[in-house]
Structure formats: C-alpha cells, structure tokens
Amino acid sequence: MIDIFSTPALVTIILGSVALLIPILDALNKERGSKNKVYSAIAFGALALALAVVISRIFTGENLPALSLTNNGVIADDIFGAFFSIAFLIVSIMVTVSSWSYMKKKSNHAAYYSLILLSSIGMILIGYSTDFVMLLVAWELMSIPTYALAAFSKRDPVSNEAAIKYFLFGALSSAIIILGMGIVYGLTGTTNIYDSVVGMTTLNPDLMPFALLAVALFIAGFGFKMGLVPFHMWLPDTYSGAPTTIATLLAAGTKKAGFAAAIRVIVIGLIALNVHWTITLAIIAIFTMTLGNLGALTQKSIPRILAYSSIAQAGYILIGLAVAPYTNYGLDASLLQILNHAVMKSAAFVAAAAVIITIGAYTIEKYRGLGYRMPITALVLAVALLSLAGVPPLNGFWGKYLIFGSAIDAGDQAWWAPYLAIAGVLNSALSLGYYIWIIRKMYMEEGENRIRQKEPRPIVAVLLFALGFMVLFGIWYGPLLDLASMAVPNDLTHLIAAR
Amino acid sequence: MNQPTDFLYIAVILVSIGIYGLVVKRNALRLIFSIELIANAVNLALIAFSRMLPSPQGQIFVLFSIAISAAEVAVGLGIIIIAYRFYKDIDITEFRNLKN
Amino acid sequence: MVGAIGFEGLGVNAWLIWMLPFIGAAFIPILRNKNEKLKSYVAVGFSLLSAFLALSILPVGLSNGEIHSQIPWFSALNLDAGVLADPLAIIMSNLVAWISAAIFVYSISYMHKEKSLIRYWFFMLFFIGSMQLIVLSDNLLMVFFGWEGVGLASYALIGFWYQDRKKDYVGKEGHTVWGIPMWTSPTHAGIKAFLQNRAGDIMMLSGMFLIFMYSGTFGFRELLTDQTWAHAMMQQNLLVPAAVLIFGGAIGKSAQFPLNEWLLEAMTGPTSVSALIHAATMVKAGVFLVARIGPLFFALSVFNMQQFFEIVAWVGAITAMLLATQALVNPEIKKVLAYSTGSQIGYMMMALGIAGLTTNFIDGYTAGFFHLISHALFKASLFMAAGAILHTVHSRFMTDMGGLRKNMKRTYIFMLLASLSLAGAPLITSGFWSKDAIFASILDSNYEFSSYLFFIAVTVAVMTAFYTFRMVGLVFFGKPSQNIVNMENKGHRIREVNQLMWLPFAVLAVASVVIGLVGFAFEGQLHHVFATYLSSTFGITENGVIPLSEVQDTTGTVEGEGQHEATSGGSEMNPVAVAASVTAFGVGGFLGYLFYIRRSVDPAKINENVVSKGLWRFLYNRWYLNSILYWMGVVIPLGFYRRVNKYFEHLLMYGINPSVQHSMVFMSKVAKMAQSGDVQIYLYVFSAGIIVITMLLLS
C-alpha cells in the first residue's frame, strides 16, 4: 500500500491539511475583516514546506527511480513526479504570494487559497500517479478547483464567461479521458498504466483501431489542458478572462500537468504500441506553434498575448514528445522547457497582474512608457518575454535549443523530425515580432506620464525571484538539465527495442 | 439483451447522442447533460468490461467516476447560476465578451 | 609540487576572489539612498576583501602549488566551469587585487562629490571582478566572459562623464588631420574603445572556437594533457592561424598595433579609471592572455609554433616604437602616460614573443612578466599622481602646469620616484631591472632578427627616458605657467592634495623602488618560481621542451632538478644588456634634463628646421594612424552604407517589409477566424479535432 512517508503522501498530507484548515479558521474567525495576508502566508508556508520536502527527497532519497514503471500501487515515489512537483510548487508559490496583493480588495480569501492548495495537490499527484484511476482522481482534483477559481470574480461577467468556457471544455475532456481509459481497460483488463502498456504490446491486431481511438481520446483529453490545436479554443478566452493570478496557475501549472499526464500515459504507453503516432504529434506540434504565434501577433490585450504565446510554447514542448522515441534527449529537453516555461510564463502573467492592480491597464497601448512607471515590473516582463522568445543567455533559450537539437538529432530515424526544428525556429522568429513589440512599447514609447508608481511588494518579490531564476539558470542550466534527465527513464530505449 | 457487448453498443449510442448534443444545443444546461451523458455511457461501458473480463477494477473505477462527475456538475451549475444572474439567460451563444 | 585542491579549503577562496567584486557590484545599488562615505567604504571593503583572499592563496603560488576546482557548467557540451590558480594566476591575481585596492582608496577622495557614484563603484567592482575572472578561470570560454565584462566596464567608465562637458575632452580642440578631428568627447572615446575591442574579441572568439572544434574543450589543462587536437590542426595548417587569432584578442585589449588608438582616447574617464585600465585590469589582460597561452603553444613546439611567437614579438616591437615616438611630442600629461603604457606593453609582448623563439623559454617569460609587475606598480602610481595634479590645476595640458614642485612637494617626490622607474634609472628602480631582463633575453635568443629587436628596444628605452624627463620637467620645473598664475590671482591656492589621495600612489612608488633595490634577487626569485612552474606543468626547461608524459613519470626527480636549475638559471648578468640600458637611460635622461629641467636649450628652436618640423607633425598626428583607421573603418563604410541604403534598403523598407507585415497580419486574422467567442464553434472544432486525429492515427 501507499507508504505514508513517501513524498506524494507527505505532500498531500501537508497541503491537504492546510487546505482544509484555512476554511475552518475562516469559519471560526468571528471578527469581520479580511484575513487575506494570514491565509496567503499560511498557504505559502505549506507550499514552501512541500517544496522543501520534494527537493530534500531528491537529494536524500537513494535509488529513486526515474519514471516508475511498475505495477506496484497507484502512486510511485519517483523523480519524474518530483520534477513536476517542483515546477507546480514553484508556480503555486508564485501565485499565492502575488495573490497577497491581487486579492487585497476582493472577498472570500479562505476559499481562494484553499482551492489553490487543493488544485496543487491534484497537479502534484498527476505527476506521481501510476494508475488510471489515480490519474483521473488527481486530474479532477486539479481541474474542479480551477473552475471555481476562474469564476472567482463574482461581479465580473467576463470572469464568469471564462469559467463557463473552461468548465464546458474541462468537463467534456474529463469525460473523454474516462472514455479513453475505459477503452484501454476493456482492451487490457487493468487500470494500471504499466500493466496496460504491457498488455498493449500483446494486443490482438484486430483490436488495434480501438487502441488508436483511445490514444486519440487521450490526446484530445490531455491536449485540452496543454492547449494543443485544435483543442485550444477555450484557452485564450479563459486565460484573458479569468483573474490574472488564476490565469498564471492555469498557464504555468495545470498546463504542465497536462504534459505530465501525457508523458505518463501517451508517450510511455505508446512507445510500446507499434504505431506511427509520432507523426501525428508532430503535425499537431506544428499547427500549435504556428497558430499560437499567429494568433498572438494581432492581439491588443497583454493577457491574451500571453495566452496565445502559451499555446505556441505548448507546440515547442510537444516537439520533444514527438521525437522522444527516436532520440535520447527529446524528453529531457521537453522537461527542461516545461520547468523553464512554468517560471517564465508565471513571471509574465504576474507582471501583467501587477500592472492591472497598479494602473488598471490590460491593453498594450496602456503599456507605453511602463519602463518609467513601474521599472521592476517592466524589467522582469521584458526579460520573461525575451526568455519566452528564446534569447540567449536566458533559460528559455536552452530549453528551445535542446528541443530543436533533439529534433535534428532524431532526423536519423524520422525523416520529418528536422522539419520540426525548422518550423520551430521560424516560429521563434515570428514570435519575436510580438515580444519585441511589447518591449518597445514599454521602453521606447512615451506613456501618459513618467510618474513612478508604487509596485506591490509581494509581487516585486515574486518577480525578482523569477528574474533570478531566469538569469541564473540561463547562464548555468546544468543542474536543471541534470534533474530533467534524471527524471526520464534510461530504459526508454529498451522499451523501444522491446516492441 | 443480456450479452455484455449489448451494453457496449448502448454505450456507443449514448456517446454519440452526447456528442450530437454538445455540437447542436445552445443551452448551457443541455450541454452539461450531454457531457454527463458521455460520462455515464463510459461508466456503463466500464461495468460491461468489468463483467466481460472479469475484473473488479472497472467497477471501482465507475464509483470514482460517478463521484467526480457529481462534484464537477456541482461546480458547473454554480457557475451557470451566476451567469444567469448576469444575462437572465443561459444561452451560451450570448457569452461572447471574449473573442479573437 | 603540483597539488590540485578541489572546491574546499583554499579552493573556495579562489572562487571568491573573482566573485566578491561581482557580489559587491550587485550590492552597491542597494545603497543608493545612503551617504557618499558609506558607498565608497563598502566598495573599498569589497575590493580589500578580495585582495586579502588573493593574499591567502599566495603561499600556494610561491610553493608552486595549484588550485584547480571545477563544477559542471554546460553538461550538454561537456563544459566545466572552474578556477585554476597556478603560480602565474596567483601572482597576477595578487597584483590586480592590491593595485586596484590602492586605486579604490584613491578614488574615495578623487571622486568626492561626484554625482553618479553608484554607477562609478558598480562598474569599478565589475571591472576588477571581470579581470579576476580572466586571471583565475581555467578555460578560454570563461576567460572570454571576463574579457567581455572588462570591455563593457571599460566602455562604461571611459564614457563615465557622458554629459560630454568640454573639460572632460581629450586632445587639443580644433586639431584635425585629414578631416578627422583629433579631439574626442568621453562618449565618443568610450564607443571607440568598445568597437576596437570588439574587433579583437571577434578574432579571439573565432580562434577559441577553431581550437574547440578540434579539441572539444576550452580548458587550459585539458588542452595540454591531450595534444591530439594540435596534431589534427597542424595537418590542416590551422594551428598557427588559430593561435594568432587568439592573440588578436590580446592585441585589441592591450592596445597593440594596429588597434592601439583607443587607449589614447580612453583618457576621457576619471583618472582613477585610467590608472585601473593601465595598471591592473584592461591592458594587462591581453599580456596575461599571452602569458597564459604562450607556454601552452611553446609546449607544442613540435608543431612549429615559431611564427606565432614571431608575430607576438614584432607586434610588440612595432607598438613599443610607435607609441614611444608619439609620446615625445604630446602636450597632455595623461596622454603621455597612455602612450608610454602602450609602449611598455609592447616591451612585454616582445619579451613573451622572444621567449618562444629561443630554447630557453623561461628567461624571456620571466622578463616579460617581471616588466608587467614593475610597470603595474609605477604606472598606477604615475596615473594617480597625474590625477592629483589634474585635480589641482584643472587642466590636462602640461603647458598649463610648471613649477609645481614647490607647491606639491609630496606629489613631486613620489611621481619622480615612479618616473625614474619608468625611465629605468639604473640599479635602484624596478623598471631598470625588468627592462634589463628583457634586453638580456633578446640578446640571448638565437632568433635571426634578434639584433633588430634589440635595436628597437634600446631606441625605445632612450625615448622613454627622454619623454619621462620631459613630463617631469614640464610639470614640476620651470616657471609657473599662465594658467597657474591666473588661478593664483583669482585666489586659488595650489597646494598638496589630501592624504587619502597621495598615500596610495606614494605606497606604490615606494614599492617600485624597494623592488628595484632588491631587483636582482627579486628577479631570481621570480625566475625560480616560473622555472619550477613551467617545468612541472608544461615540461619546459632551460633546454627546450621535454614531452609532458616524461615529466609526469619522473615528477620527483624533475622537481629536484628544476629547483637546481632555477637557481642557476638567469643569475648571470648580461653585460651588454646592462650597458645598453644604462646608456639608454643616460642619453635619454640627459637630453630630457637639458631641454626641460635645466631648460638650457629651448626645444622650440629645434623645431625651426623643416625636417624636424615635419617629423614633429608626423608624430603629433599620431603617424596618421587614427585618420587612416577612421577613413577605412568609419567614413568610407558609412558612405558605402548610405549608397546601399539609398538603393536597396529603401526597397526593403518600403517594398518588401510592409508586404511581409501585411501578410502576417492577414494570416493572423485567418488563424483567429474561428475564435469568435462562440462556445458552440469551439465545441464543434473540438469534436472535429478528435475525429481528425483518430483518422491521422489510423492512416
């Protein structure tokens, strides 16, 4: 059974107890008045503790498997999960701390932070789960709180609309995921991921179309969270309509959870399946990048640009998944980019949130002269955008560089793989168009005034952390890449050979 | 109507109805119904598989699935009630503030 | 004894030496609202801390130990970041740290009441941090990072007074040559330094990567232990070009011919910056790089590296000659010092080059490095003293000074001491001994053109003595100039600068004399340290190179022998060299004394005939090099660019560009067509997507 001292269990206990504690505290609290700071601090403490647990487990835990491929239990304590947990926890911490400022004037703080914590548990458990049932439960634990969070501005019809769109797609995609899982269960008679992968290898060829249908359903179901074309339609609307901190959580957190699930289920599962599924992912990747970047090119609102850019980024990351069977470091590169993107995109969204609460500006026109009005925010936003565009020596560069490198490397075995790299490079160039445009508006053009605004302290702290992360791991990306490659099983190639 | 495969046929029909409803209907509640229809079709299929194989895991799966659907719908209905307050209507084609 | 110490104990110190200044630079802006004293003291504190750390590893260096600690950096390329503190790096690092600490102390007073002090200290700390990074890193790539850092900091500091006030200009106003103005503003000078350095950096970068392509490593030690790359490169005839390209970086940084022009105009920055650039950080980086890679290439002498060293030696010789001649006629005190720096660096390059052309590498190497040390001491001192004078007189022209020895006694004494060292006053100054060592190594070499080099070296020494005395004479002797009389009439009193200002250069001047007094022993010691270092690390002994494998096989015996050899080597004085350097000092010094101190001959009289007038103009116009470079590098390309712009870019801007833009916008609109906000359509696309993907998978 589940070891109570394994990382996922510990983290669940820490975060879960605090998530339940906050509403109870709120109920017991007789005084009127907001306890925003208190709850934020408690949530931050819990998340930081969880992060410490995960990181210390990586350093102290000997013989941690990379990506556990066993049929023992429903969750496995492995580095793959730990890697994603680190990404999710960093994002959650950034969201929590910046909410300190963002939620100041809003109500229902207890529920807000509690839901963020619950959603974080869901994301983390996705990374760790080795069973379809567990995966489903974690998936829903992640999703359901975010539906409520997206609708959190109760007086704002836009937030509500964002939530409705998000909810409809979310519910549909979870139904589709269950459908896929049901088919796999029907074909292999087990809900354990590893067992079903093994079962797939000995599948009756007549039943192959059903297996492929299941794969398609998984791609659609997980792809909805990842923002893959054509399952992306909800994404720009929701990201730009939801409260900006929640958009951060969605773009940087749940999106990556989609990738975690996809790697757990599709990539690992499909490698066993002797099908040319990779080219399908490659086609999706190209469409996703291109559409994301083209869409972002003519936007006027910053959160919307960021939403489209996160679609494009999903396309880049998907390249690594698509070439995973052909090269040793396709998945490493994707994982690295996932962590990098989590931080970059959080930084950009949090900066946008800071601008919204300080000067109430959404549109790019209002960002003119921001470099003078909110210097720190503008600086970090600029760095985050450059990093998203993949300008060296920032961390986003290395992720992209390795992804494109792996695509070229895969060219030996898959003729189409180098074209992915070419498409990726062209798209990066295209994306510079709108990233630089924003930076130009902020620094080169004169705004309404040059009065320096007071930037909210917690958000400044978050932004500086992100800035440090982006620059430091841009110059010295070694540890992150090492961690990413530790998280990917070496015997992936054995699986390929075994099929 | 006693073969396990018959249940699967019914499940497929239900899924198709659900998808049809999703694409055609404009009422938010109906959309939720459609989605639920798909989910429940899967539940049915899972139980059928569980009988066919035979293995108990499928039935456990269904229990989880039902609980989750319930939670999901509860949140969804909440959101739609708020929407009703704004628009006095739950026609999803009305919700078009966010576009492009 | 070669002891590699990892990332513990002293290894941490070695890392911190270069990290501390950076940390300090990051820390300084926090103090922006604090008072001036605190800012200065914090900055000085950081530099002193770094200096003491450097001191802590000095024993390791003197006992021929080595600290080499690495951490993984770019795992994909198999690159490690590391510090390599071997005797060379440790001595250099101490030199840099202590001289910059002295300059920092001086800056407290010199930059008093300056407005943008934060910017000043930030870049100063950044400057020495980058320099220490160059000195201590164990691979070319990190050297390059430091290299760029130094370039950036120098750009920022040379153009420190970016307001371009007239008093910060350099050169005589209105002096144009071939239509090119010879006087420049701080920002202009900063950009010029930056661009000329870029030219060098590009060469260095390409050389580095050329070697990397063959060896797969940037590490100095790795390049040495596995020499197959050199073999492969030699077969492609790429080894010498690659080495020369790396030397190109040194040419840019050390302001050697033909990239020497920037140094002369880098005088627009605060004088403390000039002192730092000339004594400790910037120009020494180039010499250090050659000292770093020189033994490596010499150890590869099987592959016939002769040409590389020849180029180094001749570039050094030409620069020494070129700049010494120009220093003879310049009227600005800081510029005279700048010329002299370039020319002295030329000496060092000459020595390092000649080292590679003989079998006895150690002599020339030691001579070059010894000159680096003594030059760093006296040049820092001279610049700071010159700064003190500028501070008092408010003019950069020596013609505006004169007779200052009565008013500024201390400055006079210590500047005189440092000047004597520059001029090479026999037996008591470090400059004499190091110059003498260079002469000796040139004479001892069996290079076929060594007599020409020797001739150049001696001529330059004569000129050096002459212009040094000229400078001293013009500044401190004679009658007070019109400027000073005016100032005194207005009620300004010309008086000694405060203690915080004169103490640093006094210390350095005295140090330079003290080293001079024990110069012979000092040289012997240095020779000993380098002999053991070169023999144990590179396998370079008195009689050429023995393969490294043999060195490592017989470490014990070689050690013993090395020490023995070291004491014997370099201890004989070369009488010709001594005679030459004494004569050079005598001739140059006497002439200078006659013209400018006793003033028994009026220099203006010599200028009356046509030949000397033409010569004077030729030198004063800097051999027309500046103008040529401008015409070739700026004016003509710009003209060409304008033509191109007119015909092609116009087309690009107004023809192709908008159409690209419009088509992109159009495509963007198409891409977003479905994004109508209608959930119905979204759901439809979603469902269709599932079907399409299923089809794709099934096909």
Image (cartoon, coloured by chain):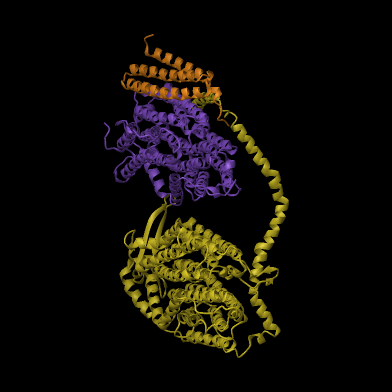
Chain colours: A purple, B orange, C yellow
Position of residue C541 in the picture relative to residue A59 (left or right)? right
The percent position of residue C451, horizontal first and vertical second, equals 54, 81
Camera-side residue: A26 or A272?
A26
Position of residue C504 in the picture relative to residue C254 (left or right)? left
Residue at 66% in and 80% down: C615
Q: Looking at this rendering, what residue extends furthest in the top direction?
A: B1
Count of numbered badges drawn on the protein: 0
Residue at 41% in and 81% down: C514
Camera-side residue: A87 or C158?
C158
Q: Give the image quarter of residue C48.
A: bottom left
Q: Looking at this rendering, what residue extends furthest in the front direction?
A: A31
Q: Looking at the image, can residue C618 be seen?
A: yes
The quadrant of the picture occupied by the N terminus of chain C is bottom left
The percent position of residue A471, horizontal first and vertical second, equals 46, 50
Q: Looking at the image, can residue C258 be seen?
A: no
Camera-side residue: A85 or A67?
A85
Relative vertical location of residue A438 with respect to residue C576 in this rendering, above or below: above
Position of residue C328 in the picture relative to residue A384 (left or right)? right
The percent position of residue A245, horizontal first and vertical second, equals 46, 37
Relative vertical location of residue C590 with respect to residue C625 in this rendering, above or below: below
The percent position of residue A12, horizontal first and vertical second, equals 32, 35
Q: Give the image quarter of residue B9.
A: top left
